[in-house]
Amino acid sequence: MIFKARKRSIPIADLEIKKSDISKGAAWTVKTLQQKGFETYIVGGAVRDLILGLHPKDFDVATAAAPEQVKRIFGRSGRIIGRRFRIVHVRRHSELIEVATFRAAPLQQSATADGLITDDNIYGSAREDAFRRDLTANALMLDPTEEIIIDYVGGVADLKKRRLRIIGNAKDRYKEDPVRMLRAVRLAAKLELTLERSTQAPFASLGSLLAAIPQARLFDETVKMFMCGYSSQATMTLEKCGMLFELFPHIEKFDAQQREFAYLALGINDARQRHSGNASLAFAIASLYWPKLAKPFAGKTEIRHDDFADLLRDCGLRANRLITKKTMLDTHDILMGIYRLRRFHNTKRALTILSYAHSAHIIKKALMLEEVRVEANETDSNVLDWWRNLIEDNRQRIPSLPAKKKMRRRRPRRRKRAAAGN
Ligand code: ATP
Ligand code: MG
């Protein structure tokens, strides 16, 4: 099998990676440790991204040196952090490089009866460190001094084929850590890679294992999943394998219309993220819950407060384990916003509501949702148009909508007001 694959060294030039693509701080950190006799590489997502021709957002380093040794070598530029995994933050000019010691796969004793890993903090060799990682694409090691990539797992070949593959037996690896399934889904969506068949096959049967993951860790993954700019693709994969309904147990399966709505809304949020980095997690979550709330109102122009509040109470949002209470409340407000847009439509109170920063913020998100409803032919555009005009006509009087004001101040010569961009 491929996982007995030989160690390969591939010159970075063969992969069209230039030395100048590599962070200077990381290369310096690696070299410093190598000169002290410790095998050291740049590892993880950065190597993967370089091969794909992307700009890594950070460069992580892995070394044979123990954290105390790393700390001693870098003196005041190094700080040991973390309790469970002790890593060293090395500061080099304006860069911060995370240096971790090679770790081995955890011992059997540290797994629960279900195979869930509870302690995986055992030091090991570079080879062991590669094999304990999740995906072959994430297990590559780059030596910036020699300008080569060390590949123990066939990750370079997989990346050339643009596929993501789990290292080892997929079921076992997901049982050890079910979050790996979510990581695989997210990275495939974000990097536009294909999930190899046996990597994806266990999702359908193992999705329920996510229930054992602590809430804080699930929330971290949820944020990454819905804020990566590719959440609509990721959600499609989750839906296909049944994991979406595992994660949002109260949302029953989407029908065609609900699906259209959800993906339209997520796609709009993704585009915002990719263009200006301002996606909203609460909006993404609202996009998944709205289709369920929408059904009873299909074709109706009036929405009664109590009916709406009842639905919102019973839709399962409050019980969702993926999100924090704050995100849950923001999501709740956005969904309730669909009601409020109607309640205060054609009233003087509307302007008062917009004068409060928090409620204006929520109204704007609710308008985004309303826009998707219009686009999906769920409602006409009367309410949407009325609020948009109100905001446009009163931009100067609404202190909570500062974006355009700032722009005007920076361009004093411009007389005409900037057109409404949203
Ligand atoms: P991103 O671009 O989202 O940061 P990444 O691959 O760098 O992607 P990190 O969460 O920063 O993701 O993790 C760094 C590396 O640690 C990964 O590339 C992978 O090798 C390893 N890793 C992370 N999470 C796991 C896990 N659950 N199981 C095994 N290895 C993991
Ligand atoms: Mg990373």
Image (spheres, rainbow, N blue to C red):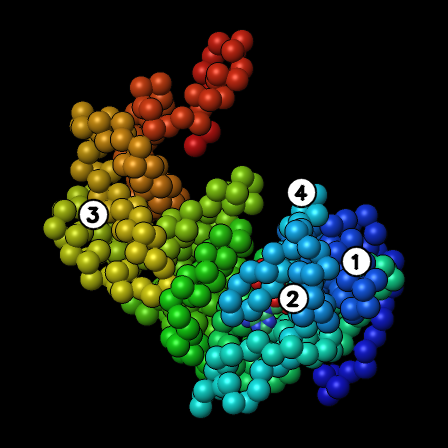
Q: Which residue is mark 2?
A: 68
Residue 121 pos. (x, y %)? 57, 76
Q: Secondary structure at mark 1?
A: helix
The disc at residue 300 is 3
Q: Is mark 1 within 8 Å of ligand 2?
A: no
Q: Find numbered disc 4 in the image and state the secondary structure of the residue it sits on.
A: loop
Q: Earlier in the sequence, mark 4 or mark 2?
A: 2
Toward the viewer: 31 or 374?
A: 31
Q: Secondary structure at mark 3?
A: loop
**Viewer-nearest of labels 3 and 4?**
4
For the residue labelled by badge 2, is the local secondary structure a helix, a strand or a loop? helix
Which numbered disc, 3 or 2, marks the residue closer to the eye? Answer: 2
The residue located at (48%, 17%) in the rendering is 408
Residue at 53 percent of width and 15 percent of height:
411
Badge 1 vs badge 2, beta-carbon distance below 8 Å? no
| Nearer to the camera, 345 or 36 | 36
Which residue is identified by label 1? 32
- In the picture, measured across the screen, residue 201 lies left or right of residue 256, that is right
| Identity of the residue drawn at 30% across and 37% down | 358
Q: Amino acid at mark 3?
A: Lys
Quadrant location of the C terminus? top left
User: Can you give x and y, in whole percent of width and height, for residue 68 in the image?
Assistant: 65, 66
* Distance (Cα) linking label 3 and label 1: 69 Å
In the image, what residue occupies the spot 48% across and 42% down? 278
Please name which of the two marks, 1 or 4, marks the residue nearer to the observer.
Answer: 1
Q: CA distance from mark 3 to mark 2?
A: 67 Å
Q: Is residue 6 above or below residue 274?
A: below
Where is mark 4, residue-wise? 94
Give the number of the disc on residue 154: none
Q: How many neighbours does mark 2 have within 10 angstroms: few (below 14), some (14-19), or many (20 or more)? A: some
Q: Nearer the viewer, mark 1 or mark 2?
A: 2
